[in-house]
Image (cartoon, grey):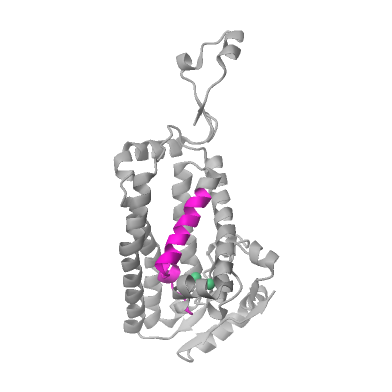
Amino acid sequence: MLRTLPVDNLIRLNMKPMADINCTFDQHGDPNGDRLLLQALWDDLRARREFLTSPYLPACFAFFIHILLCSPFLVFEALGCFWPRMHFYRISRNAEPLGLCLQRWVDCFWRIFIKYLTTILPASALYQSVRNPIFPELAPSWRVLIAEVIACLLLFDALFFIWHYSMHRVPWLYRIVHQAHHQNRITFALTAQDASPAELLSLQVLALTSAWVVGCHPLSEALFHLLNTWLAVEDHCGYDLPWALHRLLPCFGGAPFHQAHHHVYRGNYAPYFRHWDWLCGTYLRVREEAGRKHGGRTMRRRRRRKSLGSDCVCMCTYNKA
Ligand SMILES: [Zn+2]
Ligand SMILES: [Zn+2]
């Protein structure tokens, strides 16, 4: 949205009107702001407006990005079948042969693919054909981009917490909408979107609502959707990797936090951050963290011992905070 200076003020200041000097200010940042690279990227995207407004693009893009972000974890799992040390950071151990591991991924892939084809694709195509996408001339500044993405993540986290908590508290809602997602007690990256069509749609609605309420620039919205997909994959990946976001920023729950929810079917309802569960008394503390505080040796020893053990050993125990 463009904002112009009042003409009266310009005449008083002996300046030319806005249209003459072609000077515009944008609510998404100051004109001399740090948006040099962003502007080039945004100009490039604007030139492909026809393609970007295709009704089938959002669903196809969401599906392929999800598969792409999951693929490194498939490599981890496959290598782990031959080389158990690859499972060093795995939260729950699945000592299963490669065939079984791949079968789980293939089954999950087809379940998600069919739901996208029959529900997400038609619904998002319908939404795209009725909405009127806006392509402002200016890109946001880096500061605005980061602020808008953080605001979207915080809002989505709060909305999802309420929705997720409600699904667990209302039995028919759980049965119809959420139960399909809990068929995976031990999660792997692809299971982030292994949910009922109603739940997948509801997550899209919550994400779009968050971006709409924040009123963010389309570039910020795209980055938010991308981050949203990555965080969901990381939550379900089943690995507590040293470079995971929750290790760098402790306000994030990460994979151990969400895996605890899948293990005990309650608590840790927020998707990304810890604060709502902590404030509402639904926070499940992962006991594994205690071991790490003392140099992580206890857990490492336990992992080594159990890596030689049973078919499926849960490495975590949970306490209510
Ligand atoms: Zn989950
Ligand atoms: Zn749940």
- Dividing the image into 4 quarters, which one contains the C terminus? bottom right
Q: Residue at x 57, y 68 (%)?
A: 166
Is most of the magenta stretch helix, strand or loop?
Answer: helix
Q: Is residue 91 visible?
A: yes
In the rendered image, the vertical position of residue 319 relative to residue 232, given as above or below? below
290 displayed left or right of 73:
right
Percent x, y for residue 136?
43, 34
* Residue 63: x %, y % from top left: 35, 60
Name above or below for residue 109 compared with residue 15: below
- The segment highlighted magenta reads 184-211
Where residue 106 sits, quadrant-wise, is bottom left
> Is residue 295 visible from the viewing direction of this image?
no
Q: In the picture shown, does residue 307 fall above or below 257?
A: below
Residue lying farthest to the front in this orientation? 172
**For residue 321, side relative to residue 72 (left or right):** right
Residue 209 drawn in magenta: yes
Across and down, in percent, residue 88 comes to: 49, 78
Magenta span has 122?
Answer: no
Q: Is residue 247 left or right of residue 101?
A: right
Considering every residue shown, the one lying at the far bottom of the view is 310
In the rendering, at what x and y percent does residue 243 appear?
A: 52, 64
The residue drawn where x is 45% and y is 90% is 311
How many numbered discs? 0
